[in-house]
Amino acid sequence: IEGVFKSPPAVGNAFAVLAILMGIWSIIGVEFFAPFAPQHFGTFARAMLTTWQMMTLDGWADIARPLIYGSNAQNLIAGPIYFVSYTFVAAVVMANVVIAILLDNYLLAIDRQNDERDEAPAFCLTIYGAVRAGPKK
């Protein structure tokens, strides 16, 4: 539990990077896809919600398929590049960064506990040896 409580600053940094990435891809999505999918990319706020949905992999294919396979020639290349690159960066890379941060802090907490456990018997033996030897003459 100690590892989880020490993680918020690092996890917050990862989410800040994720928010910047979502903002960048949202701006690109509004520019490319607003005329073809206004319900998903009509405004920046809608695009941010859509990129969050894509990051969680919650029905992102239902958003991507009409824009990739649609009749607009502009998006024949832009659609796949946009959706695949964002899904890889946000869902695969950034999710693993958050997991790595939590795991690293957990392992550091376990190492600290093990160090404390190793130091306690040595300290007790030192005190026991001093008591057993008795007072110095």
Image (cartoon, rainbow, N blue to C red):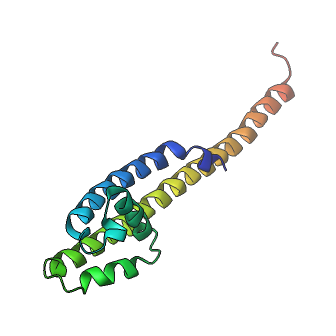
Q: Position of residue 75 (x, y in %)?
A: 18, 77
The one nearer the camera, 59 or 101, is 59
Q: Position of residue 130 (x, y in %)?
A: 80, 26
Is residue 79 positioned above or below 108 on the image? below
Q: Is residue 114 left or right of residue 25?
A: right
Q: Quarter of the image holding residue 49?
A: bottom left
Q: Position of residue 51 (x, y in %)?
A: 37, 65
- Residue lying furthest left: 73
Is residue 33 positioned above or below 2 on the image? below
- Residue at the (82%, 12%) spot, across then down: 137
Q: Is residue 114 left or right of residue 22?
A: right
Q: Quarter of the image holding residue 46?
A: bottom left
- Residue lying furthest top: 137
Q: Is residue 122 left or right of residue 59?
A: right
- Residue at the (40%, 48%) spot, across then down: 16
Q: Position of residue 110 (x, y in %)?
A: 62, 51
- Residue at the (13%, 77%) spot, across then down: 74
The one nearer the camera, 93 or 109, is 93
